[in-house]
Image: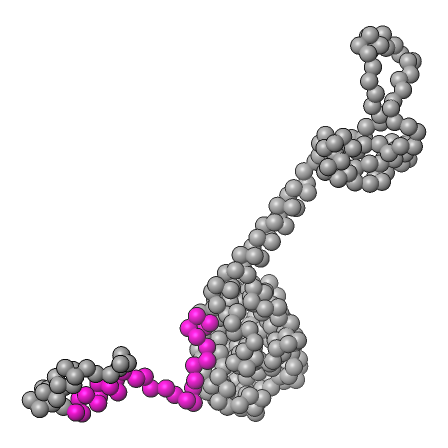
Amino acid sequence: MGKDVLTQSEIDSLISALSSGGITAEEKEEEELSEYRTYDFRRPSKFSKEQIRTLQFLHENYARSLASFLSAYLRVPVQIQLASVSQVTYEEFVFSLPVPTLVTVFKMGDDMGSSLLETNSSFVFPIIDIIFGGTGQVPKYIREFTDIEISVMKQINSHLLDNLRYSWEDVVTLNPRVEAMDVNPQFNQMFASTETVILLTFTTHIKENEGLINLCFPYITLEKIIPRLTSQYWFKQATRQSSQFYEKAVLEQVGEIEVELSAILGRTTVTLDDFLHFREGDIIQFSQSEGEDLDILVENQLLFKGQPGAVGQHLAIQITDWVRKEEAESGG
């Protein structure tokens, strides 16, 4: 019998409880219903908690990267923090935005779809004012953006998107490209209203001005790489990148170490008696024939063969071949 089938003794106990008033049929029904969780079909949860945590970690790094970039670019202190990561519908995201605001539609990569970057007026106006020589003031009354301001912010937002590359490099190689800009998000209907999106909200502080940045990643855009949005995959990639970084650093350090290189002009054997009678002007004949390659040693290890010559006023040797390990061990 299946595990959900009641035994005869359990059935008898239930009948007895109902008969004695110990439990009512309504209470039994409520108990069964309480085991189920209400599911909202208008807001399906397509991203797991682990995937959301991974996105949170990636964009905490992104926030620090943006703060460093803007501080250097504007030459004023800029603070940016990731405030929240939520899973909402595209319609909820669009209708939560103020008007006017700048919505930048960008393609994430060659094989990926589009996403949105929203920069609101409290973030945009201080930047515009600083770039035009001001102190970062915000207009007393919020107004529409001018064409010049939109053009300037298009360049700024391109830089903001470029910083996504570094935050995502352990997951996927991005190549963000601006596709369009709009000042009224409600006119942007590029995704279905019920499309599930990941919404990342950042708080910004430019001098005394507080602002907001929103990144919106539709599920359909991230669908291909969602399996990579796990701590295990990220840690594996990050470890590999870290190993490559340290390997490169070690190689750079090792590359500065000086080693002794010598070329052996020739070799021969003599008797001890001959050695004791050597005088200035004596000629010693080597075993090498004329034109034969000389041995080149690196830290007393035979590694190359070469031909002697001269460069300017200095003796030199031209490498003609490298010596295999077996040949070096056997004496060349």
In this view, the residue in front, 126 or 246, is 246
In this picture, residue 251 sits left or right of residue 40: right
192 displayed left or right of 8:
right
Above-or-below relation of 121 to 280: below
Image spot of residue 315 (x, y percent) = 87, 31
Residue drawn at x 68%, y 42% as measured from the top left: 255
Q: Which stretch did the figure color magenta?
A: 25-52
Question: Residue at point 21% right, 90% down?
Answer: 29
Confirm whether residue 73 shows in the render.
yes
Q: Percent position (x, y) of residue 256?
A: 68, 41
> In the rendering, at what x and y percent does residue 208 appear?
48, 70
Q: Quadrant of the C terminus?
A: top right
Question: Height in image: 54 above or below 105?
Answer: above
Residue 4 vertical placement versus 255 (above, below): below
Q: Nearer the viewer, residue 130 or 50?
A: 50
Magenta stretch containing residue 38, yes or no?
yes
> What residue is at 86 percent from the left and 38 percent from the top?
318
Relative side of 137 to 316, left or right:
left
Q: Residue furthest front?
A: 1
